[in-house]
Image (spheres, coloured by chain):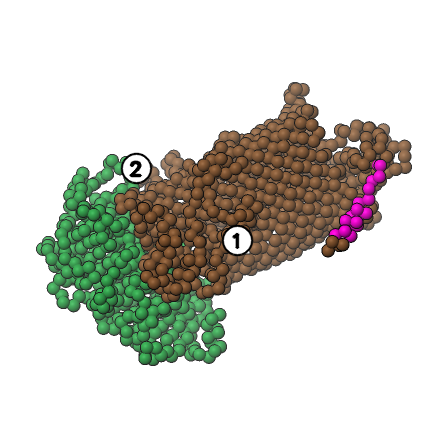
Chain colours: A brown, B green
Amino acid sequence: MKNLLLFWVALLTTAFSAMAQNGIIRGQIIDDASGETLIGATVLVDGTSTGSTTDLDGKFSISVAPGTYRLRVSFISYETKVIENVTVQAEEVTALGTIRLPVETSALEEVVIESKALRDSESALLTVQKNAANVLDGLSAEGFSRTGDNDAGAAMRRITGVSVEGGKYVYVRGLGDRYTKTSLNGADVPGLDPNRNTVQMDLFPTKLVDNIIVYKTFTPDLAGDFTGGFVDVTTKDFPEEFIFEASANIGFNPQANFEDDFLTYRGGDLDWLGFDDGTRDFPSLVNEVEIPDNGASNPELTEQVTRAFDNNYDFQREAQPLNHRFSLSAGDQKSLFKRPFGFIASLNYQRNFQSYTDGETGRYTLTSPEDQVESLNRELQLVDQYSQDIVLWGAMANGSIKISDKHKLSLNILRNQSSEKNTRFQDGDFPREDASLDYQTTQLQFLERSLTSFQLKGEHVFGEDNKAVLDWTSSYILSTQDEPDLRFYSIGFRPNTNEFEVAPSIGQLPSRYTRNLEEFSFDNKLNLTIKFKQWNDLESKFKVGGAAIFKDREFREDQYRVNVLQGGREVWPEELGPFYYVSEAFEFDAETGEGAFINRFFIENNNYDATQTILAGYAMVDMPVTDRLRAIVGARLEQTDIDIETFSGREGNLETFDLLPSVNLTYSLQDDMNLRAAYGRTLARPTFRELAPFESFDFIGDFIFIGNPDLERTLIDNFDLRWEVFPSFDELISASVFYKSFQNPIERVTNPIAGNPEINMRNVDEATVYGFEVEVRKNLGFIAKPLLPFSIGANFSLISSQIDINPLELQSIRATVPTADEQRVMFGQSPYIVNAYLSFRNEKGTQASINFNVQGERLSLVTDGGTPDIYEQPRPMLDLMASQNLNERWNLRFRARNILNAEYKYTYEFKGQEFIFQNSQLGTSYSLGVTYSIN
Amino acid sequence: MKKIYLLLLGLAVIFSSCDDDDDDATTTDPGLNGETQFVTRTVERNDVTFEETTITDFGQGTGDFTMRTGEVYILDGFVFVNEGQILTIEAGAIIKGASGQGENASALIVARGARIEAEGTAENPIIFTAEADDIVPGQSRGDLVTTASGLWGGVIILGNASLNSVPNEQSIEGVPTNLNRGIYGGDDDTDDSGIFRYVSIRHAGTDLGSGDEINGLSMGGVGSGTTIEYVEVISNKDDGFEWFGGTVNCKYLVAAFCGDDSFDYDLGWRGNVQFAFAIQGSAGERGGEHDGGEDPETGEPFATPVFFNATYIGQGQGTSTRAVTFRDNAGGEYHNSIFAEFGAGIDVEDLDDGEDSFARLVAGQLALANNAFFNVGATGVTTTVNNVTNRTDSAEDEFSLTSGGTPGVNDFDFDTEVYDPGLDMFGVPSNTGSTDFSSSEDPFFDTANYRGAFDPDDDTPWHAGWTLFAVAVGAGETF
């Protein structure tokens, strides 16, 4: 073993041969107009024969002795650029960044520029955006550091038309996550939440990310299952020079850190690492014996099983330390077997605490026709106390090698682990049951998620004049979600008798769940791009490709309840304390038959296996029709096959074959002004959970959720029109309108014939969404010179959505609200979104920004009958960031988040009054960080 | 899978329901159209040899089928009598529910448009019990402790009578809402679902997940043409009897030791009940939980059932038990009845505004007359009728009652009396005292000039012999 290690060390040392005394110059050449990389461009050190040609990424690397040089960059039919004052130091890398070559228009003199004027990566992305045939928006690594966002979820709020729910789930143009798709380096990432369709963006620390691009119109080379937006997160591959960064942050939220009222419960020793150490495992006995349904049939075994479980239902109040975050990342580019080898490795850990003790939970109903009453009837009103201990860490390694200038291979390994330890206690009035009753409910949860991804990518350029590019990706991703020993405990206290009570009429018997979800995803994609010249000799592209994506999910749930032999209702005096029912003192005694026992409540239907296979193929052409008009025309075929089967044999199945045509047109009004029009047909598939025909009880929403195996996929016709102008680098002004027509949209609806509140998924006939969005990103230097360090950005989207209400449901609504509309807004759709920022950056290394984000009220829960639906109210978020470079290596950063302490408020509205369904405030959090970085 | 295994072992005689050609989409369930399996074997136990038939419904229901005297039938999961089918149960047949929870719960469901002909006798009742209950034909009880509950689902009868919900069809509690055969309600208030007489339903009410259980006997939209009398529900984990809308009349009901409420109604039931006896064990909450409507609460027709001669016995003063709660706009009447040993008397819900049970009281659709109360209320204090408010303006209670049942702010004549009716807790409750009785023009009601469920002059009360409650008490058990 040791010898083997030595061998590798020796090999690596040899492979990364030292650079001797030379230094290295690196850079990238792109087409000034299109932003595309130029392959085979020549870079010469002026006055020598030393030089290089650019590889498939348009990159070059030249090793020269220390000194100051002029570089001459040239390429057929492009202007030649001379770069002055390129200083090279021994064993150092001089990174020039991106060099733009304009197409040669006349026999001009050479253009001479200073080397330090070159770097500006945001504008490179903007060039891609400007020239992309489809509508897209994006943010690059530099943008993240300007806004100070740590994770992709936070960063994405800056992008036009993007809103992020709960810091995690991305909505594009206010469309729900069903219509948003996320990929990592172009490969699907499975969602971790079984009830959601999309990835939690907070799993990606921005440190690991090179850029995030949001595509808003469909082209055939993109997967067809997005409608609002397709979010592609690209990780870094070839750093131009050695980079190293270490940072440490501490954060403080007066509501959570050092707060004595923080709720927590006894967990495992590894909770801080995002893992349960086995503390929450159910006793092994439960797998070894057949647990009797009822204590009466086998009292001895019942007692044995009951005693095997711990009695940990209680929670404590305990102050917690500061929030903290550490990250370490390094990357470099070396020669490996004399070929360029780039790598990035990163490790990131953070732990945050959130808490509130003055939240409110309420349930209200409309009991009579609306003209007979002035208010809703209060059924439940509780004080909500909730604390979260959130751990997230990620490790990533990416290695890329250029086998030759024309062949590149990359391997990316990613591992994310997160956990939430949630403790919640709610108590208050339950007047429907008994006006004097004090209802108390406790929830102890540990939610553990992981994502492990292996991704191999290749890119190959071949053919005469590098006309053909073949790229492929093959990824294997495992994601898991575990909820070990999720505990619910609901009791009533009756002040008139001074007794506590457990009873089915008050709430479900004390229960313990364990849930595990495991999903494998194997995602393969292949694209071939062939460049050609169209009739007017203009550069065009023809692209064909295919994809094969396989997913495999297992979901398991096991459940135990604490019960008494007679009827399930138990009453005990106050002196014995609220947790007496689940205490050791009251555990079942086989001899007397008295006490509470644990019985298994395994529901076969709540366990399912599912597979999804998607096969796709496409062809498209990307071609200028005239000098000013560019078109992408093509179509994609997607075959879907989803199967799901529960343990009890209930099945859900979806098989479709869809043709998805698309046309994107870009008309260049001026050099810096475009008009775009696009049509594309996309689809939306139901999630596994939505197809799974089992019912689960959602404690938080107190309704039953039942999947629907008869769901069909939704087809959407999308129309987009956008005008945009790019006044200069880093600046953008755009205005868009869009219209989307949905066929068979999948919506959450209530079931009007169900005895208890029940949410179903159903295909609704039709829905439409249309909207308007504007974006401005502008430097303020044009007003007055002193304002040069300031930039503003703002975007605003106005969206309207409508779906038809199912006739039976409408009938039930109109029983009390005769004038109710026959349509309602789409689930989760915001009517407006506003993002704005003001940023400051000067030459002395000072940066600051203020960001504001708000979105309009969104339909959050459809209620039974005429009771008003529940809406999530607008939540204006104001964040501030300031940072100062202390010297070349050290940077100090301060950040304040949620300065307005916005309310997370969900309400019913009736006759102008607001009734709280759920309301809480998380408080403002402050953090201070220090970063040490090399380059 | 288990069934196939049995089949391969050749233990079984198998036949299938044969007359089901009903393809009506609303009465069958998509993807569930398999033939019902009847697996019969001969069992010898406790020196009795009998046939035991396990019934598994894969979608086609029981078909026309007869459960015979002297035989045992095991319900394996939900067993439906589908629309158009008739299930006949002879006196003395024993039907057992297999254990299982959630959607594996076992229950007998007489679907809308189906018929049940279950006619037991006082000597030979039909017994529904748990599979775990070791009982053979001819025995009056098995070996389970009397109060064991929640061991199987229960019995559900569905019909075409009207409800006050919108829409006028609902999916019965306890059956997954995506099973069409669980839907009830219609517009035939004289609908006839058959006969259900001398039946004892024991140890049922298994937990179904999703926060609800199956009642002992659930009646959804059952019409007045149906005969339901002499039915006992004992040791059910949830409610004893529950009516969801409909118009069915019932006589001679026993609800003993149920985990929640003994008699419950909802969605606008308008039937009559005479001779209803409820006794709580150590569990149980309300003698009667009476809800008017749900979606909407003001749905019409209002719930206006009429009870004569009920006896409800709770767990004693000072407990959190309640005799009867009227809420969600429920109306209803109690006459000539006895309420004893509850923590609170009759609740009438009074909301801030809108329709509520108090409004039904004012409108004369909620009435209480000639009832006796004993040991009801907090210890040492007797209350009869309480206005239960969910009012924010509690100072403006529309009526209030001082202890002893004297009307306060507003005057309502509840015509109540507080006296000791001389009940022997577990034996046959007797009655003495009052000479004031309500009477009804409705021919359904027998003339009974006494309060409570039992005639003080009758030596053999109507529940003797065929109820497990009477058998257990007769054997000297106390609860």
What x and y, as percent, mark residue B64?
36, 72
Q: Residue at x 30, y 70 (%)?
A: B142
Q: Residue furthest left?
A: B435
Looking at the image, which residue is at 53% across and 57% down?
A555
- In the shown orientation, is residue A621 left or right of residue B313? right
Q: Position of residue A31 (x, y in %)?
A: 77, 37
Mark 2: few/some/many CA within 10 Å (<14, 14-19, 20+): few
Residue A24 shown left or right of residue B279 in the figure: right
Q: Position of residue A867 (x, y in %)?
A: 38, 44
Element marked by disc 1 = loop
Could you tell me which quadrant the N terminus of chain A lies in? bottom right
The prevailing secondary structure element of the residues shown in magenta is helix
Outermost residue, front side: A2
Total count of labels: 2
Secondary structure under badge 2?
Answer: loop
The kind of residue tagged 1 is Gly
Q: Is residue B427 magenta?
A: no
Tell me which residue sits at (37%, 56%) in the image: A587
Residues shaded magenta: A5-22
Q: Tell me the residue that label 1 is attached to.
A: A278
- Examine the image and state in which quarter residue B182 appears: bottom left
Q: Amino acid at mark 2?
A: Thr
* Quadrant in the rendering for residue A50: top right
Depicted A238 relative to depicted B206: above or below: above
Q: Which residue is mark 2?
A: B392
Subunit that carries the residue with mark 1: A
The chain that hosts pointer 2 is B
Residue A513 is at least partly visible in this image:
yes
Indicate the position of residue A717 as horizontal and vertical percent values. 58, 47
